[in-house]
């Protein structure tokens, strides 16, 4: 038998470090969008006022309008058989801007630090949770206005300051956290490319 | 202030999600294993012999510093377990710890005496000295480290009767590197000690069952079982100089791919601290160690052998004091102030009706206290000898007892910022007779 004089040396293959550029390209615009939402809060709230007015008209057949650039909408109601037009100012505490802007910034942070999950998964999970937050926040205000129109200040209090307010938003945030976990955080990124 | 209001909602919402995930997972695990919440509820401790395991050998490490008050019954309980070796590590005691240990264990207990300057460098160093002793014995006896289990017991700790029959079979899975037992407080005869039992037995135990899913059960300082080969993999000194060397070890083992498990069918009992100043001191040390574990988070994120679920669970555990405890200690007071300022809104909502006011008050109470009520119910089911109403009342006291957590978290932060890392150990209570419930 001829013995080989060649020594075989096994070199452990090293996995190249993941390319973080795709994540940076995704994180930066998301962060910019989040900051924009927070900085342009008044304009965002104006948009919410317009949306709420439209929803009051289409869902409850209640005339509503936003006559200026301020985040104020007027809706038609009846007081003693006489039509009146109360106004509602969409303030910071009832606006979704802080939740959505904050969620966008948190997503940008996750894209950079939680490289275990794919970019697409994090973005989709973020989009879903931000949409839910926006929908619930808007629904809260729409239902509060409708409750006010029907039952006066008591109705507004029930919807905005008790059941509809803290309970609904806390429950929504809890639900969104639970939803974001499997969809955004537990998905596995491919070992190369999408880091 | 919309920022604070938003932050309050976020902290409450994510805390709720974390609570639901862990507690829910724990309850599901119990159901899957067809185990009732009350398993071990009326367990007895340290009073029965047990037979040696067919394959595994067990070494008990009992680090001690001035433990003469409690070491005797502990050693007596451990040395009656066949197939085990008990090593008391006397870390420079200046009381009669060693004589008491020898009197209790006779020829069945080994004592490793450490003197200054090596002694009193922390529990981790004492355990490292103990493991060096174990490694020498294992080598002398020609034992396979993969079949040697090391159990860390506090000087006041006692295993539930039959514990080894439940714990050792878990190591039949070669992937299991460690097992942590749930903790029962023995001297639960005052409100303060009973509340500590509620935290350990009612809350922590269930969340630990939940961590079985990810195999990231957190290790504690008492009733901590580890496979010797897993400890060997961590290096010469498995227990670090961290203030919570057990948490540090758990993270290290998990990073190496070892599973960390528990069982609802065994437990360890120990003393709780009986005075508020001592409790504050103990919990501040624990908080400091827990908070400093944040330094391991980058390792967790980078570890390729960790699944996302395991990495997420470990990360969450490390970040809880920073993202939940500390912020909530401030936001809680903001919420209280807002409630006081807007108190008149509740009258508006009730519209002068006392029934409506009662409903509103009840709704707020249920919303704010729902997790506590759930935990109180669970605590009652864990040991039905403690009445349901008492359990619920105990759980409701969290609103006040949280101030212990708040205080300790901020004190720990201050110590971290000042670079203070040395601590005195927890003082023991001499027990004259068995405690009745």
Image (cartoon, coloured by chain):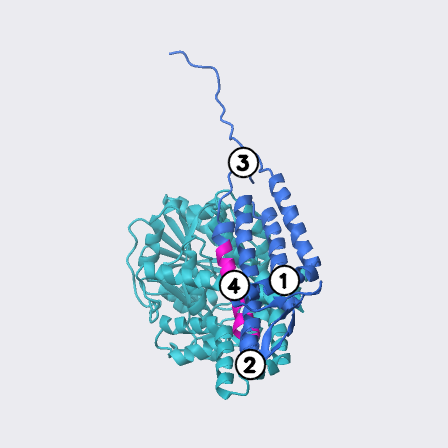
Chain colours: A blue, B cyan
Residue A57 percent location from the top left of the image: 56, 65
Mark 3, chain letter?
A
Is B415 positioned to the left or the right of B431 in the image?
A: right
Is B225 positioned to the left or the right of A154 in the image?
A: left
In this view, the residue in front, B104 or A40, is A40
* Measured Cα–Cα span from mark 3 to mark 4: 35 Å
Closer to the chain start, of discs 3 and 1, is 1
Residue B76 percent location from the top left of the image: 37, 66
Mark 4, chain letter?
A
Judged by its main secondary structure, the magenta piece is helix
Instruction: Name the residue carrying label 1.
Output: A50
Q: Which residues are magenta?
A: A160-180
Label 3 Cα crowd, 10 Å radius (few <14 / some 14-19 / many 20+): few
Instruction: Return the mark for residue B299.
Output: none
| Residue B75 position (above or below residue B229) | below
Q: Are marks 1 and 4 in contact (CB under 8 Å)?
A: no
Instruction: Give the image quarter of residue B229.
Output: top left
Instruction: Return the mark for residue A192.
Output: 3
Instruction: Name the residue carrying label 4.
Output: A172
- Dots 1 and 4 on the same chain: yes
* Measured Cα–Cα span from mark 2 to mark 1: 27 Å
Instruction: Name the residue carrying label 2.
Output: B349
* Measured Cα–Cα span from mark 1 to mark 4: 23 Å
* Measured Cα–Cα span from mark 3 to mark 1: 45 Å
């Amino acid at each position: 038998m001829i013995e080989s004089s060649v020594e075989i040396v096994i070199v452990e293959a090293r996995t190249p470090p993941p390319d973080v550029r795709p994540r940076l390209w995704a994180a930066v615009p998301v962060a910019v969008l989040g900051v924009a939402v927070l900085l342009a809060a008044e304009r965002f709230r104006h948009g919410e006022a317009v949306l709420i007015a439209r929803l009051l008209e289409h869902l409850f057949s209640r005339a509503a309008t936003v006559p200026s650039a301020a985040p104020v909408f007027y809706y038609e109601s009846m007081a003693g058989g006489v039509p009146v037009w109360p106004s509602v100012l969409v303030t910071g505490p009832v606006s979704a801007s802080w939740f959505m802007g904050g969620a966008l910034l948190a997503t940008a942070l996750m894209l950079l630090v939680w490289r275990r999950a794919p970019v697409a998964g994090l973005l989709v999970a973020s989009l879903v949770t931000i949409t839910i937050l926006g929908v619930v926040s808007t629904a809260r205000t729409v239902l509060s206005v409708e409750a006010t129109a029907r039952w006066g200040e008591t109705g507004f209090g029930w919807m905005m300051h008790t059941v509809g307010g803290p309970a609904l938003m806390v429950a929504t945030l809890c639900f969104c956290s639970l939803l974001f976990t499997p969809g955004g955080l537990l998905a596995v990124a491919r070992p190369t490319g999408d880091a | 202030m919309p920022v604070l209001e938003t932050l309050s909602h976020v902290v409450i919402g994510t805390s709720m999600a974390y609570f639901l995930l862990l507690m829910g997972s724990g309850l599901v695990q119990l159901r899957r294993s067809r185990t009732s919440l009350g398993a071990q509820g009326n367990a007895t401790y340290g009073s029965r012999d047990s037979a040696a395991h067919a394959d595994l050998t067990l070494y008990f490490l009992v680090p001690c510093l001035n433990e003469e008050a409690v070491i005797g019954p502990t050693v007596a309980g451990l040395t009656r377990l066949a197939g085990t070796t008990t090593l008391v590590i006397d870390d420079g005691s200046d009381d009669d710890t060693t004589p008491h240990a020898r009197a209790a264990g006779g020829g069945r207990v080994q004592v490793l005496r450490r003197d200054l300057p090596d002694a009193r460098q922390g529990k981790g160093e004492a355990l490292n000295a103990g493991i060096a002793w174990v490694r020498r014995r294992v080598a002398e006896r020609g034992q396979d480290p993969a079949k040697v289990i090391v159990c860390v017991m506090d000087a006041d700790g006692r295993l539930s009767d039959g514990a080894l029959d439940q714990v050792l079979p878990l190591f039949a899975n070669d992937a299991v590197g460690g097992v942590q037992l749930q903790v029962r407080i023995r001297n639960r005869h005052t409100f303060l000690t009973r509340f500590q039992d509620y935290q350990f037995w009612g809350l922590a135990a269930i969340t630990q069952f939940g961590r079985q899913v990810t195999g990231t059960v957190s290790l504690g300082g008492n009733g901590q079982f580890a496979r010797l080969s897993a400890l060997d993999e961590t290096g010469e000194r498995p227990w670090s100089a961290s203030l919570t060397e057990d948490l540090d070890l758990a993270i290290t083992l998990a990073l190496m791919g070892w599973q960390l498990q528990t069982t609802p069918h065994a437990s360890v009992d120990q003393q709780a601290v009986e005075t508020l100043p001592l409790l504050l001191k103990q919990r501040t040390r624990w908080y400091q160690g827990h908070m400093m574990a944040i330094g391991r988070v980058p390792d967790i994120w980078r570890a390729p052998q960790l699944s996302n679920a395991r990495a997420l669970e470990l990360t969450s555990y490390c970040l809880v004091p920073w993202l939940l405890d500390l912020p909530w200690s401030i936001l809680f007071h903001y919420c209280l102030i807002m409630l006081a300022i807007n108190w008149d809104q509740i009258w508006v909502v009730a519209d002068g009706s006392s029934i409506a006011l009662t409903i509103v008050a009840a709704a707020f109470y249920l919303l704010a206290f729902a997790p506590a009520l759930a935990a109180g119910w669970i605590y009652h089911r864990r040991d039905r000898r403690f009445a349901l109403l008492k359990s619920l009342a105990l759980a409701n006291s969290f609103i006040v007892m949280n101030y212990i957590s708040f205080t300790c978290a901020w004190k720990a932060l201050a110590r971290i910022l000042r670079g203070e890392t040395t601590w005195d150990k927890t003082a023991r209570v001499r027990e004259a007779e068995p405690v009745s419930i």
